[in-house]
Amino acid sequence: MSKIKILVAEDESDIAEVFRIVLESKGYEPIITADGEEALNQIKRQKPDMLILDVMMPKMSGYTLVKELKKDSELAGIPIMMVSAISQGSNKPDEFWQQGMGVDDYITKPFDPSDLLKRIENLLRKKREGWLDKDRQPFLAAQAMGLATEPMSKPAVSQESKPQPQPESAKRIAKTVTPEDVVRTFIESWNTQSFDKEYLCLSDRLHGNVDLVDYVARRKSYYQETMASGTLRQELRQIISVTGDPKETKVTVIRADIRSGKEQQFREVYTLALLGGTWKIINVRRLTT
């Protein structure tokens, strides 16, 4: 029986070596690559059984690589685990980052090798049993967020069929990620320069289809320019209303900008859509208060 091939894209050689040792210890065949472009070439050539990707990599980020893979029907079904340090210090669970990046699992660096192996085995098992394909369906993703109660059109269900149990990870997502969470994260990410989190709150149209690495770099540059002329802090002061349906929601809030101790408040309406299983901001409108 041929070994299970797992491609690792990691530009830090010491961490890549840890991946190699851990994977070989369980009989997997690791394919180690050092940047996103090399990873894409190796994926096309070797068709690995699973991918482990870093986000911040030379030539092509892990986030951009995922988007490229989804364009290819032969590669789109490969299970993907993202392992990155960009979520360090965040109060959001790994599932928040997993949904935002459109991958099958996410682990924050530094990671526990035993936890890594368990989650690799879980992904491979879900792929064998067809669970990953089900998890990727938009309606099931909406159920996982706790925002859909039934499909738009009900399929015929035989008496013998039974609904599949919802994974524990989906139940955790339902409790933690709401449109209000996304809006608060977006507004207050400025205060800690958590522009990676800010990026994940936005639809592709709003962040201009730039990749995560470029977006974070641009926002950090703008932050430094802004703070050079006086401090700025952003706060969500009040959620006035949340209206909509399982596919699109409007969140109206009072936002405060505190510049060098002077506060100015705004009323804003955020429109969010359920895209790829997670809420994304698709429009922001500022009203007079």
Image (tube, rainbow, N blue to C red):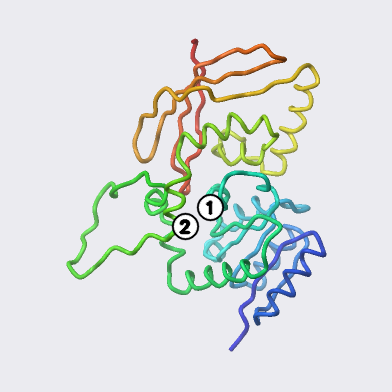
The reply to whether discs 1 and 2 touch (Cβ–Cβ < 8 Å) is: yes
Q: Residue at x 46, y 36 (%)?
A: 179
In the displayed orientation, state which residue is furthest to the left: 159
Q: On residue 52, which mark appears?
A: none
**Gap between marks 1 and 2, in whole Å?**
7 Å
Q: Residue at x 72, y 57 (%)?
A: 36
Q: Position of residue 112 (x, y in %)?
A: 67, 64
Kind of element beneath mark 2: helix
Q: Residue at x 72, y 52 (%)?
A: 60
Above-or-below relation of 112 to 24: above
**In-image side of 236 versus 18 (left or right):** left
Q: Position of residue 208 (x, y in %)?
A: 62, 35
Residue beneath disc 1: 95
In the depicted view, which residue is nearer to us: 60 or 118?
Answer: 118
Q: Position of residue 198 (x, y in %)?
A: 61, 36
Question: Which quarter of the figure is the N terminus placed in?
Answer: bottom right
Dividing the picture into quarters, in which one does residue 92 lie?
A: top right
**In-image side of 143 versus 122 (left or right):** left
For marks 1 and 2 on the same chain, the one whose residue lies earlier in the sequence? 1
In the depicted view, which residue is nearer to us: 135 or 256?
Answer: 256
Dividing the picture into quarters, in which one does residue 234 lie?
A: top right
Kind of element beneath mark 1: helix
Q: Residue at x 66, y 41 (%)?
A: 196
Q: Amino acid at mark 2?
A: Ser
Dividing the picture into quarters, in which one does residue 81 lie?
A: bottom right
Q: Amino acid at mark 1?
A: Glu
Q: Position of residue 186 (x, y in %)?
A: 58, 33
Above-or-below relation of 192 to 103: above
Residue beneath disc 2: 169
